[in-house]
Image: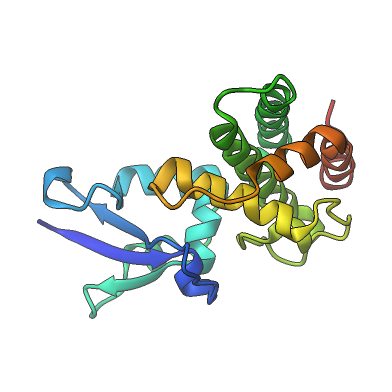
Amino acid sequence: MRHEIYVFGSMTRGEVSSSSDADVLVIQDISEPKLLPPSWSVYSKKTIEGYFADGRLFAWHLHLEAVRVYPRSGVGFLAELGKPAPYSSLAADLADLRLLLANSLSELENDSPSSVYELGIVHTAIRDIAMAASWTMLEKPSFSRYAPYELPIVCPLPIPIYEIAMRARHASTRGAEMPRDVDIAVSYFKANPILEWVESVRSEACPTHS
């Protein structure tokens, strides 16, 4: 099988913790997923090339953070691609993420029986909103798990509440241990207008959004 293997994410940012997973990217010519761990992200060269041509935020994530670990010699495919095109779907991405966040907040407000799952979605949406907005609000895009706290508009979430939501995401997607104090986090999101912060971020990052 002809392929390249990269690591990216928390491992290459120096943010590894006990709850971190290994972000592994495989780029190959022919899809052979049965030969690879199911947790690895597998893409064809054509797909990655398209992401770079379209300026996808994921392409910038790889460009800025991915480190090739196999093969050890030669020029890697990502290096050959060079810089992705400018990120151009910021407004649409922020709108989609805002809707995702609003839906999960509504579920929590209505006492969803899947509060851990919804809390995890809330975390993902908030994190991804900050990552997308960092394109225009910071000197360079941030893909840190704590991206909401790097923006110039102060995130109203206390970090411990954000981390409970983060652990809820890990519990619902990775089978990690269920976080304590889920009820406290849910109560906080019910009582605080996090969507107002999102609108402030959207207005700053993309002034023409509707």
- Between residue 103 and residue 109, name the one nearer to us: 109
Query: Quadrant location of the C terminus?
Result: top right
Would residue 135 be visible to someone looking at this image? Answer: no
Percent position of residue 99, x then y: 70, 26
Residue at x-position 86% and y-position 43%: 197
Percent position of residue 34, x then y: 12, 44
Side of 111 relative to 32 (left or right): right
Task: Choose top left, top right, bottom left or bottom right for residue 5.
Answer: bottom left
Percent position of residue 205, x then y: 82, 47
Spot the residue most to the top: 110
- Between residue 18 and residue 155, name the one nearer to us: 18
Query: Quadrant location of the N terminus?
Result: bottom left
Side of 144 relative to 12 (left or right): right
Would residue 112 be visible to someone looking at this image? Answer: yes
Task: Choose top left, top right, bottom left or bottom right for residue 3.
Answer: bottom left
Spot the residue most to the bottom: 73
Side of 43 relative to 124 (left or right): left
- Between residue 110 and residue 35, name the one nearer to us: 110
- Name above or below for residue 78 compared with residue 201: below
- Name above or below for residue 52 compared with residue 22: above
Task: Choose top left, top right, bottom left or bottom right for residue 73.
Answer: bottom left
Q: Colour mode?
A: rainbow
Percent position of residue 184, x then y: 73, 44
- Between residue 188 and residue 151, name the one nearer to us: 188
- Name above or below for residue 68 compared with residue 177: below
All told, the count of numbered labels is 0
Residue at x-position 71% and y-position 36%: 94
